[in-house]
Amino acid sequence: MSSAADSAYDVVVIGAGLSGMYQLHRLRELGLRVRVFEAGADVGGTWYWNRYPGARFDSESWTYGYSFSDELLREWEWSEHFAAQPETLRYCNFVADTLDLRRDIEFGCRIRSAAYDEARSEWEIEIEDGRRARARWLITAIGPLSAPTMPSIPGVDTFRGEAYHTGTWPHRPVSFAGKRVGVIGTGATGVQTITEIAKTVGHLTVFQRTPNWCAPLHNGPIDAATQTRIKATYREIFAICRESFGCFIHQADPRHALEVSPEVREAFYEKLYREPGFGIWMGNFRDILINQEANATITEFMRRKIRERVRDPRVAETLTPTNHGFGTRRVPLESGYYEVFNQPNVRLVDLRETPIERITPAGVKTTAAEHALDMVIYATGFDAITGAFDRIEFRGRDGRRLRDKWVDGPRTYLGLQIEGFPNLFTLVGPHNAATFCNIPRCIEQNVEWVTALIRHMREKGHTRVEATAEAEPGWTGHVLDIGRPVPFTQVSSWLTGINSNLAGKQRRTFVVYAGGAPKYRERCDEVAAGGYVGFTFQ
Ligand SMILES: Cc1cc2nc3c(=O)[nH]c(=O)nc-3n(C[C@H](O)[C@H](O)[C@H](O)COP(=O)(O)OP(=O)(O)OC[C@H]3O[C@@H](n4cnc5c(N)ncnc54)[C@H](O)[C@@H]3O)c2cc1C
């Protein structure tokens, strides 16, 4: 493909994951000249980068794909209820081919900075290789989980064996057979990686700082009859997702946890524990995530499950969270995770008792011992939601830096626009319902809303749009108010802006909109129907 940088466009989109791909498709329909710049060598975003062993959905595959195109829905078949990464990456490629997206995407281009040029009412974008592009509108599709972080441990560069971060996993096969492997991190990614490599590893050491409440995934193949049923009922499936809090297929049970007898409650929890996906989290009693007492009942149930599945009571205790209730952090879904710790060749190291002092040339040294390793895997996750923004130097009107504006936490209007940064839209950005969502469902809403706003501007002859100085604190205050009583906003996790590996990310902020996708959509629709209330146009 010829280089199209150093050029002018109507719209520049940064990122070619599911958000950027769909945004490109929609803007083309408006007849706009669009260019997408993507750091990776191909489409797919999350599914391009995260090739670690065991990487797969926790959304049901058939609820995750794009819903906007009957052709895509008809032509694509998911093989499993929770597809593995290679299949999802194939899906992204299938979409790019079907919609002929690649001709407007430039790969291997990491955007370093973006500055608003007031005189020309345009954004000037600079790529890391020094090339530039200009556009009237700038849309970030840079992902909520796309800025990998390493742990802040000394000596990381001194290790002589193989070392990998799960979020930048190599594009070649990696063998674990006969090797002594250490995994640092036990979030959703760590749980998937550990379970998969335990099947072939020589010896595995799991370094755990914070245990999570994990629930069974219960994945399985999609048989022909189910495939036919899914295809015939896509509209109903997406309608259910649309009305549920996080756009998953699971709808909260209308009962409160404490209004039923302990026996009924126990039987319900058992049923959910045997069912696939996030049902136990999203399809549970309606109050388990908002009422501490209700939450304590499911937390106790999950505690018992860990004890039942892990033979050594001390190991079970170490794997049991003590600082948060079930569901108040994102729930890792697992396929035999707890049983891994019954294997004789697997050892769990509790970093709260014996923290890592340093990575040495030979392995990992904790305060208690040096663990000799052939391979270290960093499953240490991402600088979530705001990380990819921090890695780009955004300058808005009057040279204002976004990083300075957000130093005490994000401030946005609808999680899609920022006062002082005209014509910039932030798909799946902070304060947006999309970050706590079966994400493509919310991506479609974000993209369609932004596309409609750009269409509106063109119809009215506007060249510039910006959130007002009143609308932004209004929305930001609303995000804080709606978040305050919800238990998950009172727990340290990436959903509350905490990353213990990063300076400046130790204080809880409200980075997600906790009111649920339906309410969020309603608010966005009201703003649009009112002629884009809270925005100024020129
Ligand atoms: C391992 C893993 C499993 C997940 N599973 C699920 C799931 O089951 N269900 C679910 O709903 N969500 C899941 N997610 C969340 C997932 O990120 C979203 O579902 C979705 O892929 C987000 O799409 P996106 O296009 O917004 O962002 P991404 O897919 O992250 O794409 C962003 C793109 O922007 C590019 N980019 C970033 N910064 C720059 C820059 N400066 N210059 C150029 N390019 C840049 C990146 O290279 C990337 O390709 C998972 C995430 C991970 C990491």
Image (tube, rainbow, N blue to C red):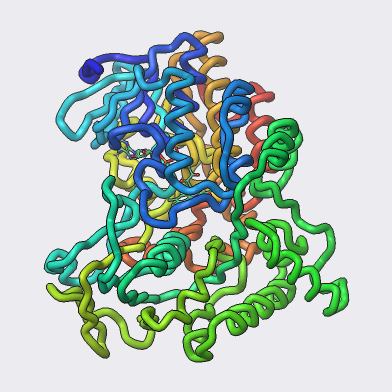
Q: Position of residue 81 (x, y in %)?
A: 61, 48
- The answer to whether 28 appears left or right of 172 in the picture is right
For residue 371, which quarter of the picture?
bottom left
Determine the residue positioned at 58% across, 43% down.
61
Q: Position of residue 388 (x, y in %)?
A: 35, 45
Looking at the image, is 94 positioned above or below residue 162?
A: above
Q: Nearer the viewer, residue 445 or 63?
A: 63
- The answer to whether 311 appears left or right of 202 in the picture is right
Find ligand 1 in the image and state its quadrant: top left
Q: Nearer the viewer, residue 497 or 252?
A: 252
Looking at the image, is 256 positioned above or below residue 123?
A: below
Q: Position of residue 298 (x, y in %)?
A: 69, 73
For residue 5, which quarter of the picture?
top left
Looking at the image, is 494 positioned above or below residue 519?
A: below
From this viewpoint, is residue 508 visible? no
Determine the residue positioned at 56% across, 30% down.
76
Determine the residue positioned at 82% across, 66% down.
256
Query: Which quarter shows the N terminus?
Result: top left
Determine the residue positioned at 51% across, 76% down.
339
From this viewpoint, is residue 248 visible? yes
Q: Nearer the viewer, residue 235 or 398?
A: 235
